[in-house]
Image (cartoon, rainbow, N blue to C red):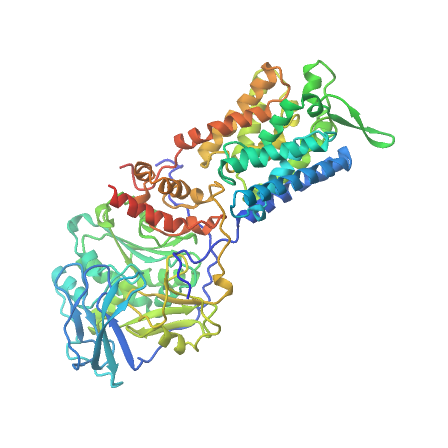
């Protein structure tokens, strides 16, 4: 007979099914990136996923810890990292990004649930700073008579910053504009977001607070709010990066503060700083504040204050 | 009152598995030997009133204790006291147990006669003599619960028929089979206890037939209200039920009577009425026997002291090798290591599961998803408690109000990382007590 503490019944949701749902939710954006940027985006993604899983496997092996690749979190990090890379990036750089994400940010801090910042996000930032020109070599999918062709060009926010012609809302929505491979198609990202909410993997609080704040604050500062929420990494960041369990607050009140904070920092960077894109840094800064937000937004226990 | 006033507490939606709800209770004949532990309630063990070789009759008192926190224990069969032995209860403590050889004559003891009840004192004495303890699971002596320090303050009686644990249907069968007794019991309690002006019967809405039937039975009583509760575990937890029916909050270190409420389980209150009519002490109990390893799941009226294996054999034996046996429901029930253990007063279910249901879940580190925080009915933060316990941080544990945890298991149920959060909460409570 088995003797274990109660409860003797558990929900069918496991860490693995949660991560699997996140992978499923990212599938539309991956398909969109293949359509927009060609099959190299699939190659970049495959390299990131494979190297993330391999680094996690090797790290756990070397440090003699239980193997954790079956929880699929390394695969999620791999896809997210790939989504943050331009399609033309040399593959060895992508592998370096995976190393930073998995080994430095995730495993050195104790593995799943312990990292202070989103691994894929830091991977992207490290690559961005280390290989600035390759990381900003954006392909610009453009519809021609021969189908979609890739022309090197700036992102919509970059174009705007340089005073160029803004991209149309429709092209922003379906992803016909320059950017990293997973961020351009707002439609596909929103589809994934709806899936995550329906499957109860995430609550709507962070994405809505984040995107809502960017919309409102951009509008107040005189920028085009629709253009702002559809361009750059906002959709990808708000739906998939800022909602990372480990690096966002636990309570809904905390999530609200977190989302608003991300939104404010994003708009400030976009409007006043020299970077055209602010999402990665905004989320990273809020990641660091998460333990403090958690402490301030502790849930009140039932049964009075004593 | 503001429209935002929250009247419901959180919880989790479970599969109900109420497989046995439509099966009428079957009476199980007493086995050849019964094993009656002298501690079947929350409190002090009884001292035996019989010795080896004595002849005992059905309903004869065989153990009692003059202390308040105790309830007498009666023989469920007639026959000879064969031995006294210690058995190790599932929580690890040793309990003195009377073993009685059944002569199958079912001779009723002379003492069994309707008690004379004229006032509160004689009512409480009668409840004490019946051996009644809270039949919902906790086993708190009922006469203690009904002995109020400030009777004039208690204005509400709540009858708990939420039966929110999956599988268990014994309280439901009690309504369907002994419904009128529930109403009679309520009237007796109202007559003698406190200044009760309102009675709520809380029933989860997954039992529509019970709700309809109880509404019919209570139609003529203006002060009794049947309250359908949303089927969300753990609606049957005392503090949750009190809050959802009356809006009153039983705070830290308080008992329901402090907010003017007495809560009784539906089966307990029906038993009070029965005892006042017959004087037959508590010597049998309705059990839901279910689970994948049981051949014939059903509700059984079992003589107290029958071993679990006797009950299983009565239900057609094991269908497959049992891997886990539970006293009580799957959410809060206790895993039993041995099917030789006897049925006690506060048992309401006996569940046996085979290999498939008991496969250990794959545990990972906490992923900080916050599901436990969203599930806890009392607004606690189990993942933070687990971390604070690991860090042996007493102050943080106190801040996190771990002492309020009722161990309902909602957090551990929803945890995708399959962490043993109930266990860590229990250990944290103990840790705080030891380092206070």
Q: Quadrant of residue A190?
A: top right
**Is A88 left, or right, of A72 in this rendering?**
right
- Is A264 left or right of B144, judged from the image as shown? right
Q: Position of residue B301 (x, y in %)?
A: 34, 73
Residue at image coords 26%, 37%: A306
- The quarter of the picture where the N terminus of chain B appears is top left
Quadrant where the C terminus of chain B sits is top left
Q: Residue B10 in the image: state x and y as whole percent.
A: 41, 46
Q: Nearer the viewer, residue A209 or B291?
A: B291
**Residue A34 placement (x, y as % from top left):** 75, 37
Q: In this image, B143 relative to B248: left or right?
A: left
* Residue visible at 73% across and 27% down in the picture: A177
Answer with the quarter of the image where residue B9 lies.
top left
Where B384 falls versus B270 (above or below)? above
Eyeballing the image, is B337 above or below A285? below
> In the rendered image, which quarter is residue A3 located in?
bottom left
**Left-right relation of B259 to A5:** left
Q: Toward the viewer: B111 or B86?
A: B86
Please provide percent x and percent y for residue B391: 36, 39
């Amino acid at each position: 007979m088995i003797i274990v503490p109660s409860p003797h019944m558990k929900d069918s949701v496991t860490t693995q099914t949660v991560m699997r749902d996140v992978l499923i939710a990212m599938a539309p954006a991956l398909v969109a990136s293949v359509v927009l940027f060609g099959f190299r985006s699939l190659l970049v993604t495959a390299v990131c996923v494979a190297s993330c899983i391999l680094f996690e496997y090797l790290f756990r092996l070397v440090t003699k810890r239980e193997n954790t690749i079956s929880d699929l979190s390394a695969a999620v990090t791999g896809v997210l990292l790939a989504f943050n890379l331009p399609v033309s990036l040399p593959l060895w750089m992508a592998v370096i990004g995976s190393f930073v994400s998995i080994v430095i940010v995730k495993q050195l801090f104790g593995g799943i649930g312990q990292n202070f910042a989103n691994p894929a996000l830091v991977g992207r930032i490290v690559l961005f700073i280390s290989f600035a020109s390759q990381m900003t070599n954006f392909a610009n999918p453009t519809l021609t008579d021969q189908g979609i062709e890739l022309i090197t060009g700036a992102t919509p926010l970059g174009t705007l910053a340089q005073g160029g012609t803004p991209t149309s809302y429709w092209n922003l929505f379906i992803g016909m504009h320059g950017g990293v491979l997973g961020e351009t198609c707002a439609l596909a990202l929103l589809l994934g977001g709806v899936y995550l909410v329906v499957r109860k993997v995430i609550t709507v609080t962070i994405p809505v607070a984040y995107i809502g704040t960017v919309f409102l604050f951009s509008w107040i500062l005189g920028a085009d709010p629709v253009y702002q929420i559809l361009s750059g990494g906002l959709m990808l960041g708000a739906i998939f990066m800022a909602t990372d369990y480990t690096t966002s607050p636990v309570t809904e009140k905390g999530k609200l503060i977190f989302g608003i904070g991300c939104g404010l920092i994003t708009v400030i960077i976009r409007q006043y700083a020299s970077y055209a894109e602010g999402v990665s840094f905004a989320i990273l800064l809020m990641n660091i504040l998460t333990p403090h937000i958690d402490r301030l937004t502790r849930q009140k226990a039932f049964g009075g204050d004593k | 009152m503001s429209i935002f006033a929250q009247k419901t507490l959180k919880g989790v939606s479970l599969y109900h598995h109420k497989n046995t709800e439509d099966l009428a209770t079957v009476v199980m004949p007493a086995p050849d030997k019964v094993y009656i532990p002298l501690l079947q309630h929350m409190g002090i063990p009884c001292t035996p009133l019989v010795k080896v070789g004595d002849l005992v009759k059905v309903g004869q008192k065989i153990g009692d204790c003059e202390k308040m926190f105790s309830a007498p224990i009666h023989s469920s069969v007639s026959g000879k006291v064969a031995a006294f032995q210690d058995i190790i209860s599932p929580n690890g403590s040793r309990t003195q147990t009377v073993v009685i050889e059944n002569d199958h004559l079912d001779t009723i003891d002379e003492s069994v006669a309707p008690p004379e009840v004229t006032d509160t004192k004689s009512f409480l004495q009668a409840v004490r003599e019946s051996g009644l303890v809270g039949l919902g699971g906790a086993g708190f002596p009922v006469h203690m619960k009904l002995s109020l320090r400030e009777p004039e303050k208690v204005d509400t009686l709540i009858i708990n028929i939420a039966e929110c644990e999956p599988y268990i249907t014994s309280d439901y069968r009690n309504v369907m089979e002994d419904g009128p007794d529930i109403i009679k019991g309520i009237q007796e309690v109202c007559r003698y206890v406190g200044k009760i002006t309102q009675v709520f019967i809380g029933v989860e809405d997954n039992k529509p037939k019970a709700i309809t039937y109880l509404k019919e039975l209570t139609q003529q009583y203006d002060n009794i209200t049947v309250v359908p509760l949303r089927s969300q575990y753990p609606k049957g937890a005392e503090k949750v039920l009190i809050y959802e029916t009356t809006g009153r909050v039983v705070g830290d270190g308080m008992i329901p009577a402090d907010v003017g409420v007495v809560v009784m389980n539906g089966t307990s209150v029906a038993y009070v009425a029965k005892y006042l009519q017959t004087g037959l002490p508590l010597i049998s109990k309705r059990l839901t026997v279910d689970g994948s390893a049981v051949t014939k799941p059903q509700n059984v009226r079992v003589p107290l002291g029958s071993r679990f294996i006797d009950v299983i054999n009565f239900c057609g034996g094991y269908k497959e090798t049992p891997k886990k046996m539970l006293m009580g429901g799957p959410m809060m029930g206790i895993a039993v290591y041995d099917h030789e253990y006897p049925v006690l007063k506060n048992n309401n279910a006996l569940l046996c599961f085979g290999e498939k249901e008991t496969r250990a879940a794959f545990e990972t580190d906490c992923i900080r998803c916050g599901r436990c925080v969203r599930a806890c009915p009392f607004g606690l933060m189990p993942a933070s408690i687990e971390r604070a316990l690991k860090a042996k941080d007493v102050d943080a544990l106190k801040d996190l109000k771990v002492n309020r945890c009722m161990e309902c298991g909602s957090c551990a149920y929803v945890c995708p990382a399959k962490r043993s959060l109930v266990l860590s909460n229990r250990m944290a409570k103990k840790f705080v007590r030891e380092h206070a």
